[in-house]
Each structure stands twice: as structure tokens, then as C-alpha cells.
Amino acid sequence: MTPLTPFENAWHYRELIRAVVRRELAVRFRGSILGWLWAIFGPLVMLSAYTVIFSNAVGVPASAKQGGVGSYALSIFTGLIVFNLFSELAYRSPGLLHEHAAVIKKSIFPSETLAWTAAIRASVYALISLAVLFVFELALTFWLPPTCLLLPFVVVPFFLFLLGISWFLMALGSFTRDVAYLMISIVPVFMFATPIFYSIEDVPPHLRFYVHFNPIGNYVEMIRDVVLFNRFPDALLYLGTVGGSLLVFFFSYRFFMQYKAVFVDVI
């Protein structure tokens, strides 16, 4: 296997991936009156709620007072976009092979493409939330930071990391349903170990080194830097996180493909 193999494989099955993604997006809001407006309405309600809660009920933490209520609400919303994208795949991936067991067993179906379709589907909703974030940021600050142009350099390795996580959880989940229940148990706890309602700067200095072992938290901080704070991510943090993401991506793909033939017998 070469470093390009996962991408060559995805390109080879691009029409299948496109068709599956289109079908899953089409059925998401089928039967509803508002349709895709619900994908916009949800993030709008969430961001509005955070703004109201932290401006009236809870108040802005001391570390966030300089930016104000609006800035803090945007910071939380950014963290939730990143974490919700991860959590959706963490919840769904262990059962993906079981979900498509009939197709996999009855035909020569490239099961590795399921990670691509799941990640792309989840990313579409994350991009809608990101668009809502940009609209609110424009309304509050009347500009978007020039560093927003660097967003693809952070989002692409994050997407590859999520693909790796999906392949790994799909492989483990094919052998036992316990993986799905484990994700349901630990992902909500993992949320509090991720700097969503706080920043890494709020963590005591002697603990920050350990916090950086959480790649989701690192991506939250880097996306906040380029989208909200108009600053470049720390070079060491970026290189370390991207390097780790690529390792997860390639290791997980190889792990999945190594046991791909076994999945048909265990799902």
C-alpha cells in the first residue's frame, strides 16, 4: 500500500460514494414541510440560546470578558461544531457494517467507502453550521478575519483524522456491538476533556501538555484561531496534530483493509 492508495480507492469508487451520499442527504428531511431549513434552524437556535444564556443567566467567564458575550457564544459554537462532527461519526461508525450487512454479504461491495460516505454526510451538516457561524460573526463584528482563508489547511487533516477514526471503529464494531455502547458511554465524558466551554489557556499550565494529547481539542483551538481570532495556529501544535492525524488515517485504513475479508463472516 502506498500513501495514495486510500485516495485512489476513493476516486475509483467516486460515483458510488456520490450516489450514497446524495441518497442519505435526500432522506434526512424527507416528509418534513421545511426540509433542509431544519439544517439551518438547528444551529441558529443553538447559537441564539448560548448568547441568551451567557448574557443573562450564567454570565461570561472572566477569561472571556474581554471579547464579550457574543464572542464567547461564537467560541462555544465553534467548539461544538467540531466536537459534534466527531461525535456523530464516533456514534455511527461501529454499526456501519452491520447497517449495510445485507449489501455487503450479497455483493462485492467496497465496504471501505462507507467511512467516506458517513464522513462526507456529517461534514455537510457541519458546513451548514459553519455558515451560520460566519453569518453571526459578520453581524457581531462586521468582518471576517483574513485568516479564514487558512481554514482548509486545518479542516482537511481533521477530515482525514475522522476518516481514520471511522475505519478503526467500523473494524472493531464488526466484531462486537460493545464498541457502539462504549462510544455512547465515553463520548459525552470526552466532551468535558475538550476545550469547548473553555480554552486551553484556561487550563493550569502544568496540565496543558496533557490536554494537547486530545486531537479534537487541538482542532477546536486551531479553528478558533483562524475563524475567530485572526491569528495563525501555533506551528508546533499544527504540525504535531496534523502528523498524528495522518498516522491515524493511514494506520486505520491499513487495519481495516487487512481484516476486510473477515467482516463478511462476523457481521
Image: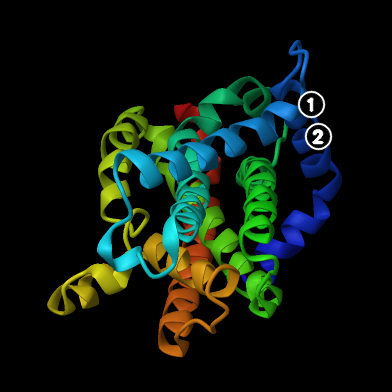
How many marks overall?
A: 2
Q: Residue at image x 70%, y 69%? A: 143
Q: Quarter of the image holding residue 57?
A: top left
Q: Between 168 and 30, which is closer to the camera in this rendering?
A: 30
Q: Is residue 119 above or below residue 153?
A: above
Q: Residue at image x 50%, y 75%? A: 242
The local crowd at label 2, few if under 14, some if 14 to 19, many if 20 or more residues have their Cα within 10 Å, is: few
Q: Is residue 213 visible?
A: no
Q: Is residue 250 left or right of residue 214?
A: right
Q: In the structure shown, which secondary structural element does the residue marked by tag 1 occupy? A: helix
Q: Position of residue 69 (x, y in %)?
A: 43, 55
Q: Quarter of the image holding residue 196?
A: bottom left
Furthest-front residue in view?
56
- Are the residues tagged 2 and 1 within 8 Å (C-beta)? yes
Q: Between 204 and 123, which is closer to the camera in this rendering?
A: 204
Q: In the structure shown, which secondary structural element does the residue marked by tag 2 occupy? A: helix
Question: Which residue matches tag 2?
Answer: 22
Q: Residue at image x 46%, y 52%? A: 73
Q: Is residue 80 above or below residue 71?
A: above
**Which amino acid type corresponds to the residue marked 2 in the rendered image?**
Arg
User: Which part of the image, by quadrant, shows the N terminus?
Assistant: bottom right
Residue 34: mark: none
Q: Residue at image x 72%, y 35%? A: 108
Question: Which residue matches tag 1?
Answer: 26
Furthest-left residue in view?
206
Q: From mark 2 to mark 1, how far is it between C-alphas? A: 6 Å
**Which amino acid type corresponds to the residue marked 1 in the rendered image?**
Ala
The local crowd at label 1, few if under 14, some if 14 to 19, many if 20 or more residues have their Cα within 10 Å, is: few
Q: Position of residue 92 (x, y in %)?
A: 49, 34
Q: Is residue 250 visible?
A: yes
Furthest-right residue in view?
15
Q: Position of residue 139 (x, y in %)?
A: 67, 56
